[in-house]
Image: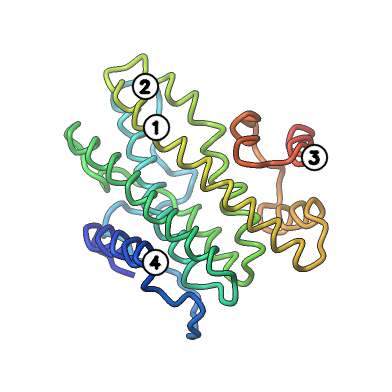
Amino acid sequence: MSRSIDEKITLTNELQQLKETHQLNYQSQYSTQSIQDPGRPQKPDLVRFQSVPKRDGSDTGLIKTIHAICHIEFNAINLALDAVYRFHNMPDKFYQDWIQVAFEEAKHFTLINDYLSDSGYHYGDFDAHDGLWTMTHDTDYDVLARMALVPRVLEARGLDVTPNIQKKFQRSKFKNMVEILDVIFTDEIGHVKIGNHWFHYLCQQRGLDSMQTFDRLVKKHIGEKLRGPFNIEARKLADFSNQELKYLQAL
């Protein structure tokens, strides 16, 4: 739960290396605890979603957008690592998948953070909200709830909104963000696909109907309709079924 950005990136990369060299025992038993604070730098200040700085199409508004993406990617490192730490008795491939996700999220954060610095700003210059980690914390009681809601709802939302964000950057002086977001978008399809795989694996293992289970968990934790519009083609690539896509489009 390091508060140092550099240390968190370094440790995540080292974990990836240990995975690649087959030096990890994924079935070792240890006690886990609920984590309110996964380790963050002193800045940015975390505020309610309604208090997050408004982002328009101006240069300053686009910098705030870059900062918001940077914050999402940093939190995504923590949520992937939490899946590795928290949930016991899963197949080795589950832990290998989420270590890979953490490694790629660290790469994404570094790309965005470096670009932010090159533009004369720093991660922490603007307030941010804690929605991604709040959902991670709220689903720490069950790996099924985690797989249903974090990759398939929160991360999948990135697939929906990224193309329009890229259009805004394409028309600005921050055109290089388009290429960076291409890298992130491709990897994120893979991350959502991993979440889909393990969600359906767990439903099958427990003899649960996946659609009923997803609907129940959405109502329990989100309590409102999922926000559209949805990027159907990207979600298909991430292995959302036709039934699931019809469910989303009917909302």
Please name the amino acid that badge 1 sits on.
Answer: Leu
Report how far apart the C-alphas of labels 3 and 4 lie in the structure: 35 Å
Find residue 232 and report its horizontal and vertical position in percent.
65, 30
Seen at 36% across and 62% down, the residue is 20
Query: Which residue lies under the disc numbered 2?
Result: 169
Q: Quadrant of the N terminus?
A: bottom left
Q: Residues within 10 Å of mark 1 (few under 14, many from 20)?
A: many
Tell me whether circle 4 and circle 2 mark residues in contact (CB < 8 Å). no
Q: Secondary structure at mark 1?
A: helix
Q: Which mark is residue 38?
A: 4
Q: Which mark is residue 243?
A: 3
Q: Earlier in the sequence, mark 1 or mark 2?
A: 2
Q: Residues within 10 Å of mark 2 (few under 14, many from 20)?
A: many
Query: Which residue lies under the disc numbered 1?
Result: 181
Image quarter for residue 251?
top right
Q: Secondary structure at mark 2?
A: helix
Seen at 34% across and 35% down, the residue is 66
Report how far apart the C-alphas of labels 3 and 1 lie in the structure: 29 Å
Seen at 35% across and 27% down, the residue is 179
Report how far apart the C-alphas of labels 1 and 2 lie in the structure: 10 Å
Can residue 229 be seen in this snapshot?
no
Please name the amino acid that badge 2 sits on.
Answer: Phe
Q: Nearer the viewer, mark 2 or mark 3?
A: 3
Q: Secondary structure at mark 4?
A: loop
Report how far apart the C-alphas of labels 2 and 3 lie in the structure: 34 Å
Foreground of the two, 2 or 207:
207
Find residue 170 and report its horizontal and vertical position in percent.
37, 17
